[in-house]
Amino acid sequence: MLVPMAKVEIIGPKSRFFEVVSLLHDQGTLHIEDLSKKIDSGEVPLEQMEVQVGERLEQERMEDLLIRVRAIIQALHFPGAEVDEVKRQREYLRLWKMDTGELANEVTGVIDEVEDKTSSLAASQTDLEAEIGLLSRYEPILHKIQPLAKQIVATGQFESVALLVERRYKGALDQLKEELDKITKKQCEIVSTDVDEDTTAAIVVFSKTYSDPVHKFLAMENVNQIRLPSDMQGMPFDEAYRSIKERRKALPGQLEDVRKELESMSNKWYLILSTIRDVLADKIDEIGAIPKFGQTSYAFVVTGWIPVDEMSGLRKGIKGSFGDDVIVNQIEIEEKDFGETPVAMKNSKIMAPFEFLVAQRGIPKYGTMDPTWMLFIFYPLFFGMIVGDIGYGLLMLGIVVWLRIKGKDNDGMQLATSILGPATMMVIIFGFLYGEFFGNFLGKEYLNLIIPIKVAGVTLPFNRVEFVTVFMYIAIAVGVMQIMLSFVFGVVNAIRTKSRHHLWERGGLLALFVGIMLAVVVGVVLPKFGTWTTVGQIVFAAVAFAGFVFAIRGGGIMGAIEMLEGMTHIASYIRIMAVGLAGAIFADAVNGIMHKSIGNPPTVTGVILALFIGILLHGLNLLLAAFSPTIHALRLNFLEFFGGFFEAGTQEYKPFQKTGGEKSA
């Protein structure tokens, strides 16, 4: 449900302004309205509250300090032990009570003590990790090259260059030799060896007399030369190889020492640094909020929104701190205010994860219905109708449970599994209704294990592959019911938001579709009543026509478009049948291939082949069943269903509140 909000206006003498702002920040329940735009447009007869020069300088100084503190925190590792939240809160309150000068001096002292050492250690860690990565690439290459280097007689008259060539282009070394012979007048030699299955290393030895033209030629030809690290330039390859091996042995220990020192600093300083970060952020936030408020010559004005349940707490806090000096007025939220009223949703624990799905469509407009509970019902329902297989459902449920246990500390994983859990349960339920276990894996005998029942003339379980028409009718019937429901919700929203045009449009569309549907039902189901059937059809046709008139009156040309869209939306629900049927037929086809692979009589080889085919293809179908039905189930809800009633809001409820020293990474 959407949390009922109250619009609030707080007025008081300018001498108490900063105290009031601090109290509001402490309470953390008021969503502040930015009055600057309304003041600029002349909508409200106020002046904008201005940040004084001194406050601006304080804000800038704290912003600079905050940047430095965040950089230090980023360099430090989060301590292994849990942070003492009581101690952090106590430290937060101590720092908050300081004036800006005292706070800046203390923060500067902490930064001076920690910043240089942290920065140095972080830089050392980065350098060591980079060097380890670099040497790990050089070592296997030099391991192959240095035996070649030993074959070369090192004299002061010759120079050598190492190259890397893709093995498929190894023949190009002969062409390279020909070109270098021309440049060096045959004072050149190339020796090569394979580094791995893809790469060949080569050493080119040539007279130093031709050093410049050779290097220029190799650069122009974009030949991939092996360039040693800067501190090994000019070193013979065998010596460079020995140096690299020694460095690679020593570096991990050095890196571990740096990491331990960083961890020690983190354990010592993380609590105070993270608390300083929170205090600075809150101080900056408080000053930054000042231009959102209005003022007159002697008074300040704060407006915003607060949940109705929190209204008494706000009044009590203001009254207790300022008596009659500060006045709190509750203003009625009118229809014109709904668009800018912030939205907060509050649902039960089992439904709350589906708020994430709603957010992908947008937050609902204040005063309208919260569609969270609708997604909680219809997303799993459609997903189950499409997949509808006990075997696939059990596998999906097992994967969801495993992921939930595996990712117990991962909020994203917990959210995803909370949404997918009900969907997989519906897959199993519809699997019983369809009589499917990995398609027709168990054969028709499986159906005899379940006592058949009749629902609306349909015998359950029924084979949807054989009864395609029935399955299509069920999908269309679901579409009709959901589209009708969307128009009903549209009428409810119109009444709630007091929108007469929306009421006419949605009510007219509802009457139009109900009239058409009942006229068809009367004509098809009750033909034996003769004249009464005709009378009924005329009555319902008149209802449909009246609905058409009201829909046009309320929505104009858009009303006519909505009618056509309603028809096409209903047809879209056939995708439940089409996508579900495709998956079921694929599963049956896989089972057919497995049955033929086993042979008659069965053979061990045939059974193994059938198992391989079954695991591979059923696994592929499981992947398709996990993604494609999700897309179609969400599409039917977001586009077809929500289109009849959903109105998007403009802003989420974000109260003006402190971090309060709470733990944040």
Image: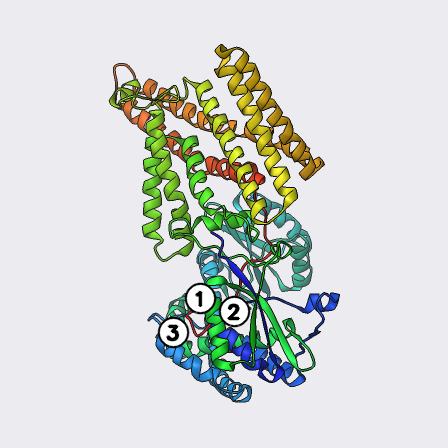
> Could you tell me which secondary element the residue under label 1 belongs to?
helix
Q: Are marks 3 and 1 in contact (CB under 8 Å)?
A: no
Q: What crowding class fits label 2: few (fewer than 14 Cα within 10 Å), some (14-19), or many (20 or more)? A: some
Residue 544 percent location from the top left of the image? 61, 27
On screen, residue 293 versus residue 124, left or right, reads right
Q: Quadrant of the C terminus?
A: bottom left
Q: Confirm or deny contact between disc 2 and disc 1 (CB under 8 A).
A: yes
Check disc 2 and give the amino acid type. Answer: Met
Which residue does the numbered mark 2 point to in the structure image? 232
Upstream in sequence: badge 2 or badge 1:
2
Could one spot residue 68 in this view of the protein? no
Above or below: residue 120 compared with residue 512 = below
Q: Which colour scheme is used?
A: rainbow
Give residue 659's position: percent from left, percent from top: 47, 72
Q: Which amino acid does label 3 sit on?
A: Glu
The residue tagged with tag 3: helix, strand or loop? helix
For numbered disc 2, what is the local secondary structure?
helix
Marker disc for residue 46: none
**Any mark on residue 244, and which?**
1
Q: Quadrant of residue 515?
A: top right
Q: What residue type is labelled 1?
A: Ile
